[in-house]
């Protein structure tokens, strides 16, 4: 229980994904009571579904020294870096320089296994951490934080409730209004940390407003409104709303091929050596940025118009399967991948896989510039060689844009003045990733800025007493 001298004012955390859980963890650690509001039926948000891992550098688990995380992130941000350059660099520096501490916090204090490290698209070094066991990293991390928080008597989580308004006076945010599961409108007072996620599922609202060209694309996000308008109503500035990441590999479920909601094919499948075939041919460096891999697919005609999707084969050999076994077995269980042979692939696949195997053996350069092949072991492919295959298509996945924050996670107005009593972390905020997000950096952003928001909120509450 809180000590007699500790703050008694409850902090309000909106959203129970990793950003909100990280913020709440810092608050609880400093004996600040937390009221967490989640509009979903269950906690965890999109974070609980994250399957590739969390970035960190340099850490004890990395096989090589890594000092390029900042530069890789700037490069990935691309054309967005021409504006708000200094502001973006400050945010990127905060995320990358705090990544080692974020990994250590999860491992040492929360008991999360993050001992396995892989390389993903756009990275020059392996730095994406996940556990060595069967549990996907997003689930492992969020579950560990939820378990810790639920053991605290000063933590209260309320699900199935929707925040409808951020309360504010002339000078500061004072709380929120929300609608509970039974339809009653409630008011909650206190400083607010907003961690309600992005707008990738808001097809008829913010997504249609800022990226109408993505109409008809399937998505990995549940259909729900974006929450940025709740923050602009109290003066928050927006940034990068036009930058929406279309992930190149969302599974086309054979049982429901036309479903607009897709399950993500984790980037680690390509990072561990998997390849992409379109009409039986490789067509891209599978480890290029998500933006470029997606662009190579969408430069061809889609197979169907609604939902707008392509038919790309994601192919792994047995070496890649063993490296990513926990992922692949799960996808096989869900019917999204299957164990097959090369003879069952599209015509021409045998010759293409043979050429790729020659590249892996160093007998020739890859025509697409791929230099990292990880665990691919198939040396002499035959029609009966075993492969693991799933059909994938580009999907709306992540929204880089959101409210403007500074390195203290404070929400800023158009004049860059902070909005007192309000912080934001995770996908609801913008400016960190620019035009393209590196895989593995979403969970990292949530931990870094979630913890920062929690710490800043503690100091704010102390200052109000």
Image (tube, grey):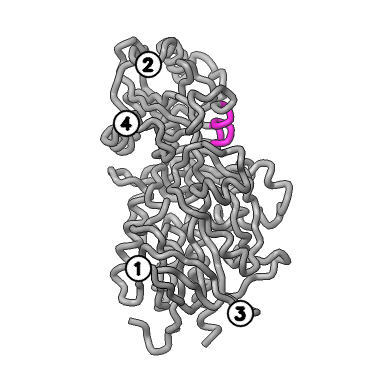
| Residue picked out by circle 1 | 182
| The N terminus - image quarter | bottom left
Question: Residue 264 is drawn in which quadrant?
Answer: top left
Q: Earlier in the sequence, mark 4 or mark 2?
A: 4
Circle 4 or circle 2, nearest the eye: 4
Q: CA distance from mark 2 to mark 3?
A: 63 Å
Q: Earlier in the sequence, mark 2 or mark 1?
A: 1
Under tag 1, what secondary structure?
A: loop
Q: Main secondary structure of the magenta part?
A: helix
Segment colored magenta: 288-296
Relative side of 279 to 212, left or right: left
Q: Residue at x 51, y 83 (%)?
A: 462
Q: Residue at x 35, y 72 (%)?
A: 156
Nearest to the observer: residue 448 or residue 436: 436
Nearest to the observer: residue 97 or residue 351: 351
Q: Residue at x 36, y 66 (%)?
A: 181
Dots 4 and 3: beta carbons under 8 Å? no
Under tag 3, what secondary structure?
A: loop
Q: CA distance from mark 4 to mark 2?
A: 19 Å
Question: Residue 428 is drawn in which quadrant?
Answer: bottom right
- Whole-percent x, y for residue 268 in the image: 42, 37
Dots 3 and 1: beta carbons under 8 Å? no
Taking the magenta stretch, the answer to whether it contains residue 328 is: no
Residue 44 vertical placement versus 7 (above, below): above
| Residue picked out by circle 2 | 345
| Residue picked out by circle 3 | 169
| Residue picked out by circle 4 | 255
Nearest to the observer: residue 42 or residue 139: 42
């Amino acid at each position: 229980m809180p000590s007699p001298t500790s703050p008694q004012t409850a902090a309000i955390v909106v959203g129970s994904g990793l950003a909100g859980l990280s913020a709440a963890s810092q608050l609880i650690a400093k004996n600040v009571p937390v009221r967490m509001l989640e509009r979903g039926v269950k906690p965890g948000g999109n974070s609980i579904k994250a399957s590739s891992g969390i970035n960190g550098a340099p850490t004890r688990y990395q096989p090589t020294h890594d000092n390029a995380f900042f530069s890789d992130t700037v490069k990935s941000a691309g054309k967005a870096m021409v504006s708000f350059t200094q502001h973006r660099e400050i945010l990127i520096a905060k995320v990358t320089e705090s990544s080692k501490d974020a990994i250590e916090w999860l491992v040492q204090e929360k008991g999360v296994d993050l001992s396995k490290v892989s390389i993903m698209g756009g990275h020059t070094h392996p730095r994406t951490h996940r556990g060595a066991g069967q549990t996907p990293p997003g689930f492992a991390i969020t579950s560990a934080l939820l378990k810790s928080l639920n053991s605290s008597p000063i933590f209260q989580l309320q699900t199935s409730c929707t925040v409808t308004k951020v309360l504010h006076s002339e000078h500061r945010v004072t709380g929120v209004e929300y609608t509970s599961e039974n339809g009653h409108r409630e008011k909650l007072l206190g400083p607010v940390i907003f961690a309600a996620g992005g707008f990738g599922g808001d097809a008829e609202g913010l997504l249609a407003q800022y990226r109408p060209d993505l109409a008809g694309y399937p998505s990995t996000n549940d259909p729900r409104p974006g929450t940025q308008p709740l923050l602009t109503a109290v003066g928050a500035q927006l940034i990068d709303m036009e930058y929406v990441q279309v992930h190149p590999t969302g599974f086309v479920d054979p049982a429901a091929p036309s479903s607009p909601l897709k399950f993500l094919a984790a980037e680690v499948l390509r990072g561990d050596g998997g390849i992409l075939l379109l009409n039986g041919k490789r067509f891209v460096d599978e480890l290029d940025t998500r933006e470029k891999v997606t662009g190579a697919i969408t430069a061809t005609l889609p197979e169907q118009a609604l939902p707008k999707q392509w038919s790309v084969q994601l192919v792994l050999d047995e070496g890649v399967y063993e490296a990513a076994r926990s992922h692949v077995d799960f996808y096989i269980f869900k019917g999204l991948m299957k164990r097959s042979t090369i003879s069952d692939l599209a015509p021409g696949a045998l010759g293409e896989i043979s050429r790729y195997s020659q590249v892996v053996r160093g007998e020739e350069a890859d025509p697409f510039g791929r230099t990292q092949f990880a665990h691919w072991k198939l040396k002499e492919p035959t029609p009966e060689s075993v492969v693991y295959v799933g059909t994938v298509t580009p999907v709306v996945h992540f929204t880089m844009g959101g409210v403007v924050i500074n390195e203290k996670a404070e929400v800023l107005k158009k004049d860059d003045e902070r909005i007192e009593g309000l912080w934001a972390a995770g996908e609801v905020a913008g400016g960190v990733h620019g035009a393209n997000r590196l895989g593995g950096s979403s969970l990292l952003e949530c931990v870094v800025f979630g913890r920062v928001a929690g710490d800043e909120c503690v100091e704010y509450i102390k200052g109000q007493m």
